[in-house]
Image (cartoon, rainbow, N blue to C red):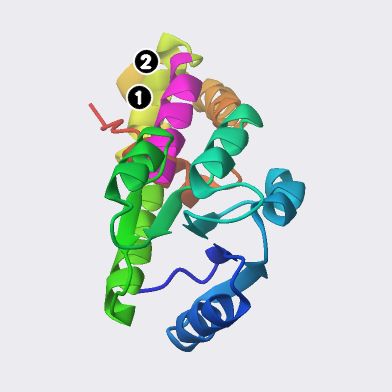
Amino acid sequence: MQSDSLVIHLVDDEEPVRKSLAFMLTMAGFTVRQHQSATDFLAVAPLIQQACLVTDLRMPDLDGVELLRRLEGLQVRIPAIVVTGHGDVPLAVEAMRAGARDFIEKPFEEEVLIEAINRVAAEMKVEADTHQAEAIRARLDRLSAREKEVLSGVVAGLPNKTIAYDLNISPRTVEVHRAAVMSKMAAGNLPELVRMAMAAGFLAQ
């Protein structure tokens, strides 16, 4: 399944090849942007988000390996798939060492590239989910012990009066702590707060 927000950036100096791949990927449901050289891509790379790079290895201005090294130097994190001709496997391995997620040998079936892109998209989702969970856990660490107790009651679905009774504090104090939890967790509403707590593995005690 293709991600609606994932943009595929094709870098290949051979226009017929580039356009053919772009057409194929567009027909498969991807949003595609074409770049005729590594230099052209590097000019816009720092502004790119939620993307996957598909680049040829052998190009006249900068080859695929050097492109990946330049991206690393710019601290641009874009997962890349390199396309290589027969006999260029050592170069493809070098590209993997430079940060490529996968390489595909020419000629290849359409499904091979689509599957590779989908694997990268799945990996990106896992990484994003992991990063989000870590960020939420960092916010949880900023909560006081009492705020965590209140959050535990909230996640358990308890009303303020019950939380107050269990903690031997007033309902008004629960409201104050609950507001502080919402603020520190940067939650817009109660369902979002509960989802965040569950994503970080925070379980009601």
Residue closest to the eye, 88 or 29: 88
Question: Which residue is pictured at 68% across the width and 54% down the height?
Answer: 41
Residue closest to the eye, 149 or 102: 102
x, y (%) of residue 163? 37, 29
Q: Secondary structure at mark 1?
A: helix
Q: Secondary structure at mark 2?
A: loop
Q: Is residue 57 left or right of residue 120?
A: right
Give the labeled residue for mark 1: 165
Give the labeled residue for mark 2: 168
Judge whether residue 119 can be spotted in this image: no
User: Crowdedness of circle 2 by 10 Å Cα count: few (<14), some, many (20+)?
Assistant: few
x, y (%) of residue 59? 57, 56
Query: Which quadrant of the rendered structure holds the N terminus?
Result: bottom left
User: Crowdedness of circle 1 by 10 Å Cα count: few (<14), some, many (20+)?
Assistant: few
Instruction: Give the residues in magenta.
Output: 126-141
x, y (%) of residue 67? 58, 43
- What kind of residue is marked 2? Asn
Query: Which quadrant of the rendered structure holds the C terminus?
Result: top left
Above or below: residue 62 compared with residue 24: above
Judge whether residue 15 can be spotted in this image: yes
Give yes or no for residue 139 being in the magenta stretch: yes
**Quick check: marks 2 and 1 in contact, CB under 8 Å?**
yes
